Amino acid sequence: MNQARLQHKKQITAGKFVVGIDPAKRHHQATIINPNDIHVGKSFSFPASSDGYTLALWKNIEKCLSPCNKDTVLFAVETSCNLWQTIAFYLHSLGYTVLMVSPLSTYHERPIMNHVFSRTDPKDAFHIAAIAQRDGPVD
């Protein structure tokens, strides 16, 4: 990859808060990190439903980030099965930047944090956000 494309990819995530979302059948898990890969608030879950997207998701985000807008926040969603599609399309329809993160990336990231290979949804949500912040969007 040439230097100009790499710089462009980094500019998309530079200085933005990243909301990492680990999709699930009934409740998605999310966490917010700042531009320095530090947790903002606590990890939270919200129902995988219309009400969950329109009410619970935004209520939890606004607890941590009062100016939540398209210029300061982007979303990273793990592409596991087909569970990611509804939340990704919903966020994209609102005009937010949505980055897709491979489940394989999350899998390989798990041993790095705390040297424990366990799988928990809050930890995975953090990994998803950190991978998006670090690596930027995929071509």
Image: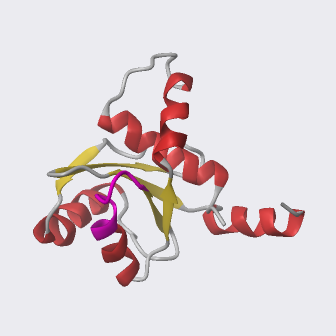
Nearer to the camera, 107 or 94: 107
Quarter of the rendering occupied by the N terminus: bottom right
- x, y (%) of residue 39? 44, 42
User: Would you say 68 lies left or right of 115 here?
Assistant: left
* Start-end of magenta stretch: 78-87
Q: Residue at x 51, y 51 (%)?
A: 34
- The magenta stretch spans residue 82: yes
Q: Residue at x 52, y 76 (%)?
A: 71
Question: Is residue 38 visible to the viewer in this orientation of the structure?
Answer: no
User: Would you say 133 lies left or right of 116 here?
Assistant: right
- x, y (%) of residue 87? 30, 67
Q: Residue at x 21, y 63 (%)?
A: 59
Q: How is the image coloured?
A: secondary structure
Q: Residue at x 66, y 66 (%)?
A: 139
- x, y (%) of residue 51? 11, 69
Q: Quadrant of residue 68?
A: bottom left
Nearer to the camera, 29 or 33: 29
Q: Quadrant of residue 52?
A: bottom left
